[in-house]
Image (spheres, helix red, strand yellow):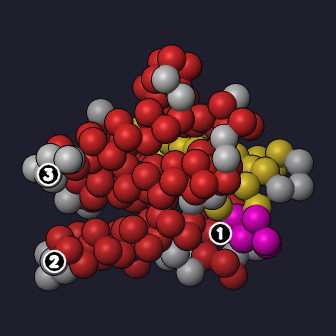
């Protein structure tokens, strides 16, 4: 499972400086070799990698589109402050999750298989992560925002990240609301860092 989500991370990182690309596939491909080099560079400290990862994810994932799909219907009734807080907390979740996966990169390669435009501002890019003799399919759902292609969902081996988080969060959203979810997300991330909320 870690290899599967590592595939998503490797290609996700490839979006840095991709604003000059004309197509979704080009946005993925332009700097992939550069970012794979960074992922495998042992001279870069963990702190630097995490900082760079946070910057890339925050700018190259469409967090408005992703958050709206994760929260689903309750998003429509959430205040602007709640939406902002969720996007901030979801960023922390994503960074911490993929920082751990980034450390496991070991010379995997990515093949770009197919690109399908879905209306003017939506696209699907199918890729494969090649790890030894194994090929892992990873599909990316992308949205064009201000002439820049961004990811809003990635689907390794048919497992949608958006659907996974929506399932994980649905119970507390339904029974306790978005404020309770935000507190739970903060609590989980604090516990990971060994911090007890007061």
Task: Count every numbered label the image shows and give the total.
Answer: 3
Q: Residue furthest left?
A: 194
Which residue appears at 59% of the width and 35% of the height? 71
Q: How far apart are marks 1 and 2 (CA)?
A: 29 Å
Residue 177 can be seen, yes or no = yes
How far apart are labels 1 and 3 at the CA level? 42 Å
Q: In this view, does 149 lie to the left or right of 17?
A: right
User: Residue at label 3?
Assistant: 195
Check residue 146 for magenta coloring: yes
Stretch of the chain drawn in magenta: 145-149
Q: Where is residue 16 in the image (x, y as percent from the top left)?
A: 52, 75
Crowding at mark 1 (Cα within 10 Å: few <14, some 14-19, many 20+): some
Q: Is residue 146 above or below residue 164?
A: below
**Separation of residues labelled 3 and 2 (CA atoms):** 23 Å
Mark 3, Cα crowd under 10 Å, few <14 / some 14-19 / many 20+, is few
Q: Is mark 1 in CB contact (under 8 Å) with mark 3?
A: no
SS state under label 1? helix
For residue 26, the mark is: 1
1 or 2: tag closer to the N-terminus = 1
Disc on the earlier residue, 1 or 3: 1
Discs 1/3, front: 3
Q: Residue at x 21, y 47 (%)?
A: 197
Point out the frontmost of discs 3 and 2: 3
Q: Where does the N terminus fall, quadrant-wise? A: top left
Q: Camera-side residue: 105 or 130?
A: 105
Which numbered tag is attached to residue 82? none
Dominant secondary-structure state across the stretch colored magenta: strand
Residue 179's spot in the image, x, y percent? 49, 38
Q: Name the residue under label 2.
A: 45
Mark nearer the viewer, 1 or 2: 2
Q: Are marks 3 and 2 in contact (CB under 8 Å)?
A: no
Judge by depth and name the residue closer to the eye, 82 or 71.
Answer: 82
């Amino acid at each position: 499972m870690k290899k599967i989500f590592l595939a998503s991370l490797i290609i996700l990182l490839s979006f840095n400086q991709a604003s000059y690309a004309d197509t979704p596939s080009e946005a993925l491909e332009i700097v992939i070799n550069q970012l794979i080099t960074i992922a495998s560079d042992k001279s870069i400290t963990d702190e630097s990698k995490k900082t760079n990862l946070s910057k890339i994810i925050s700018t190259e994932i469409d967090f408005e589109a992703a958050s709206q799909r994760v929260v689903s219907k309750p998003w429509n009734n959430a205040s602007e402050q709640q939406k902002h807080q969720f996007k901030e907390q979801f960023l922390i979740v994503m960074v911490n999750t993929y920082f751990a996966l980034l450390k496991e990169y070991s010379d995997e390669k990515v093949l770009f298989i197919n690109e399908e435009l879905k209306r003017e501002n939506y696209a699907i890019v199918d890729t494969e992560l090649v790890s030894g003799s194994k090929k892992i399919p990873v599909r990316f759902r992308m949205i064009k925002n201000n002439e820049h292609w961004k990811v809003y969902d990635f689907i390794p081996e048919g497992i949608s990240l958006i659907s996974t988080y929506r399932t994980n969060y649905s119970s507390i959203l339904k029974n306790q609301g978005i404020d309770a979810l935000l507190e739970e997300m903060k609590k989980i991330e604090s516990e990971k860092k060994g911090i007890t909320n007061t």
